[in-house]
Amino acid sequence: MYSVLILDDEEPLREAIRILGSWDMLGITHIYEATDGEEGLALLREHRIDLAMIDMKMPGMDGSEFLRRLEKDYPDVLSVVISGYNDFEYTRQAIRSHALDYLLKPVNRHSLNDVLQRAVEELNLRRKKAEELLRRGRTLNVSLPKLRENVYLSIVRRSFNESREADTLAMIGASGESPKLHAGVSLRLLNLDRVRRGRFYGDTGLLHAAIANVIQDCAPEGMDCFGFADPASHREMIVVCHLPNVSDNGAEEQLEYRIESYLRKLLPTLDRLFGLRTIAGYGAGSTVIAELADSYEQARRTVGEMNLLKLGELGYGIVAAKVCEARPGIGTGATLPESIAFAAAWARVAAAAQSGAPAQAQRIAEDAIVELKAGGYLALEEAQRLLFETEATNGDAEEGDLVDASQWERRITEAVEQCCRRARQADRTGASFHISDIRAYIDRHYFEEIKISMFTEKYFLSREYLMKLFKQEYGVGIHEYMQKLRMEKARVLLGEETLKIQEISDMLGYNDKNYFSKAFRNYYGVSPSEYRSGAGERING
């Protein structure tokens, strides 16, 4: 029924709380534990937590900082402060963060269960209020508003028959004696998960109903605005705008101006009321109701092509625009070269993770992100597609919140870390380790930067032990073996007269031709050019 997070770096205290708490009697079914603030935030992102019990003295992120983060990002999570130090500063921070209570160590059974009882009573009261709000929201969504939603949805999906449903159009106010201009708006909810969890108890329907009410309330005088959730995407609200066509001259320009003004009011209002970050696009107006589908498609395309790298520059998202920012020289819907390169880079990330090289995988991903951002443009739709594909490699892809470029980068980085963790777990359950595995890896990847730490992390063995074991088996150290293999490959490649010294240097993984030449001379006593000119016969002999 309810869930609790115990945040303390001391295992005995966490165990004592688990033993002393009357969890079943209070209806608390899930108990999560974390040893530091970062781990606690990760659990809050992953699970629905109702009550957090927080130790104030922890390494890294302490209880005070965690309380501030909790108040900012998860305001509906109740908190109880636990500390072995009767410090007024901790008490003051607990008061500032609206903590339910402050308990001193060692925690006793009576005090603990008294706090838990009051927490459950508060949660029950909140749930009752939420259910009442939900009931009211569902009541508002029946009858005429629900009919309007169904009709407009069928129009934008191009399944509405205007000739047979003329009376229905009149009933919902979409037609009449004087013609009306109709335009579609696409409203993208960028941080829906956070708002739904923090403000609406995880109920998406209740959030959509609240947004629909604000959409209608913000409509300017003389223009009708009706919004509803897209059944195909819970992160989008479809808004239909109507304006009486009082004059043929400049009517479309007037509609465009009024929609822009309307959205400039609507977006910050949603941010102020719910903390909801949104972006919006709108299409051209028309007096033909069937062309509302074209207007909506234009609006949705506009949102998808907005530049993710510039989102978040304003507090509530960005100002809506009829024509989205487009990168010069790139057509609508085209895949950018940087996106293609990023997809290729991700294949190398996965390969590095599978090979037990997490540092290399992270480096490849970071370089790919820098290259992708260098163009200055990344369409929101394209960013979401790339994110979905990277997370899909771990089997847990989902359309999560995406507010700005920094959040996109964090999710990519988390996908890399998850990919590496899965690879390590697979290794633990696989065949036993043999030193020949390292030699085989070097034979396949001699042209890459190989560090001993790659193998220590993969096989959970010390650096000294691995190097000693390798030398015992093959008579040379790991670094000496890599050097020997590269030099032997260099001799073979120098025999190909069509290859330039620079090309051979690149193929062997040397970033600098001069460094390659120096390494070759130190190893064989002649330069690569001298080897080609005849000295190679002496070396081969």
Image: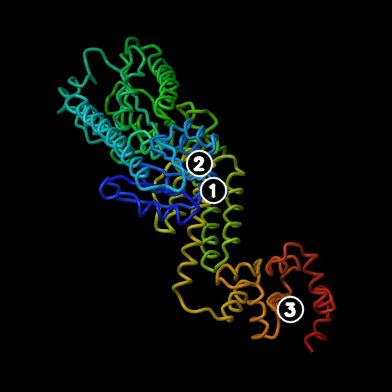
Question: Residue 491's mark?
Answer: 3
Residue wearing tag 1: 58
**Residue 66, numbered label:** 2
Give the image quarter of residue 429. bottom left
In the rendered view, would you say 440 is above or below 25? below
- Left or right relative to 283: residue 513: right
What residue is at 21 percent from the left and 15 percent from the top? Answer: 176
For the residues marked 1 and 3, what is the alpha-carbon distance in whole angstroms? Answer: 58 Å
The percent position of residue 183, horizontal first and vertical second, equals: 34, 24
**Percent position of residue 140, x then y:** 22, 26
- N-terminal of the pair, mark 1 or mark 3, is 1
Colour setting: rainbow
Count of picture labels? 3
Q: Residue 127: image x %, image y %?
A: 27, 35
- Dot 1: few (<14), some (14–19), or many (≥20) neighbours within 10 Å? some
Tag 1 and tag 2, C-beta contact below 8 Å = yes
Identify the amino acid type marked 3.
Arg
Residue 45 x %, y %: 43, 46
SS category of the residue bearing label 1: loop
Sequence-wise first label, 1 or 2: 1
Left or right, 478 with respect to 89, comes to: right
Query: From the viewer's perspective, is the residue at label 1 or at label 3 nearer?
Result: 1
Q: Amino acid at mark 1?
A: Met
Side (left or right) of 518 relative to 163: right
Instruction: Assign a secondary structure to mark 2.
Output: helix
* Front residue of 505 and 346: 346
